[in-house]
Image (cartoon, rainbow, N blue to C red):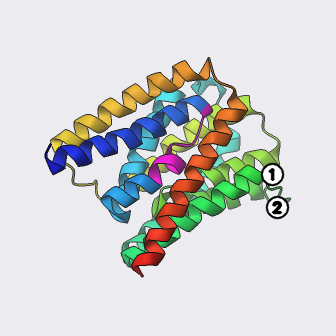
């Protein structure tokens, strides 16, 4: 098997897992896929591909739930994210690769730990909380590919239910990843890679939808979090090793 096909299949596997996770739990594509894609393609192309995949899988989920999106509540998040996405892209383009790997790994680990512990932050409430969460999310999404945890923490502190969170998180994922993609060039991949990634996204969405009807939601989210933590730690270790 050629190196091109090996890379394509590895990317497909990572994207398949991320897409399945997001359709199963409502979030998690970036947390699961970002470390693997960054290690495989490098920080620049890995983050861009993660932004694209997360945006597509969010759009697939949003197609069935857009009527439940709370546009008024999401507006401060989206505007704040739009303001910090260019800064995240600027920082990512100027950091040496080892530092960027270490930063992405650390960001994933810290974000997962905060979400796992259900951190309560009084400042992350009402409109000011939405602005702070959106600003942090936009920067992290554009620089490291992991913008979801900041929004999750805002939703937790704002008292959103899971039914409220999922459609709004999908809407936010579409918008913020569109912003992030607009700020960067698309990755240079082979035709095999694009075909495999597209197939993996569609298949992952179908698998996640099936598993959602047969899996305990709490256990699934906890497994995703541990998987993301392992990936983040691996990326952090590689960045520190190559410094």
Q: Residues within 10 Å of mark 2 (few under 14, many from 20)?
A: some
Quadrant of residue 211 within the rendered picture: top right
Q: Which residue is found at the position 46% from the left and 56% from the top?
A: 35
Residue 76 appears in the rendering = no
* Residue 125 position within the rendered picture, expressed as x and y whole percent measured from the top left: 81, 53
Residue 204 appears in the rendering = yes
Q: Residues within 10 Å of mark 1 (few under 14, many from 20)?
A: some
Give the mark toward the camera: 1 or 2.
Answer: 2
**Quarter of the image containing the N terminus?**
top left
Secondary structure at badge 1 equals: helix
Toward the front, the furthest residue is 1
Residue at numbered disc 2: 123
Quadrant of residue 136 within the rendered picture: bottom right
Q: Which residue is found at the position 29% from the left and 58% from the top?
A: 185
- Residues under labels 1 and 2: Cα distance? 8 Å
Q: Which residue is found at the position 65% from the left and 54% from the top?
A: 112
Asked if residue 30 is among those painted magenta in the image, a careful observer would answer: yes
Q: Which span is picked out in magenta?
A: 25-34
Foreground pick, 6 / 91: 6
Residue at numbered disc 1: 126
Dominant secondary structure, magenta:
helix
Residue 114 horizontal side relative to residue 158, left or right: left
* Residue 207 position within the rendered picture, expressed as x and y whole percent measured from the top left: 47, 24
Please determine whether, in this image, residue 39 is positioned above or below residue 148.
Answer: below
Q: Which residue is found at the position 38% from the left and 60% from the top?
A: 39
Toward the bottom, the furthest residue is 243
**Quarter of the image containing the C terminus?**
bottom left
Numbered circle sitting on residue 188? none
Q: How many marks?
A: 2
Secondary structure at badge 2 equals: loop
Residue 194 horizontal side relative to residue 203, left or right: left
* Residue 82 position within the rendered picture, expressed as x and y whole percent measured from the top left: 52, 57
């Amino acid at each position: 098997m050629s190196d091109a096909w090996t890379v394509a299949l590895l990317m497909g596997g990572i994207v398949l897992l991320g897409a399945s996770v997001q359709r199963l739990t409502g979030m998690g594509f970036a947390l699961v896929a970002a470390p693997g894609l960054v290690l495989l393609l490098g920080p620049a192309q890995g983050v861009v591909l993660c932004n694209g995949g997360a945006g597509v899988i969010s759009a697939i989920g949003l197609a069935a739930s857009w009527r439940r999106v709370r546009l008024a509540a999401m507006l401060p998040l989206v505007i704040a994210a739009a303001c910090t996405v260019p800064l995240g892209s600027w920082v990512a383009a100027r950091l040496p690769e080892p530092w960027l790997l270490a930063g992405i790994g650390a960001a994933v680990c810290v974000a997962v730990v905060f979400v796992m512990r259900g951190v309560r932050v009084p400042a992350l409430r009402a409109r000011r909380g939405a602005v702070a969460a959106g600003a942090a999310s936009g920067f992290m999404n554009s620089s490291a590919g992991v913008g979801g945890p900041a929004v999750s923490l805002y939703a937790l502190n704002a008292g959103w239910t899971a039914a409220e969170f999922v459609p709004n998180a999908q809407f936010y994922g579409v918008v913020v990843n569109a912003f992030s993609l607009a700020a960067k060039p698309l990755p240079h991949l082979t035709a095999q890679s694009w075909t495999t990634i597209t197939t993996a996204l569609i298949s992952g969405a179908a698998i996640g939808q099936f598993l959602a009807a047969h899996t305990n939601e709490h256990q699934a989210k906890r497994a995703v979090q541990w998987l993301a933590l392992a990936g983040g730690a691996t990326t952090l270790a590689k960045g520190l090793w190559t410094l």
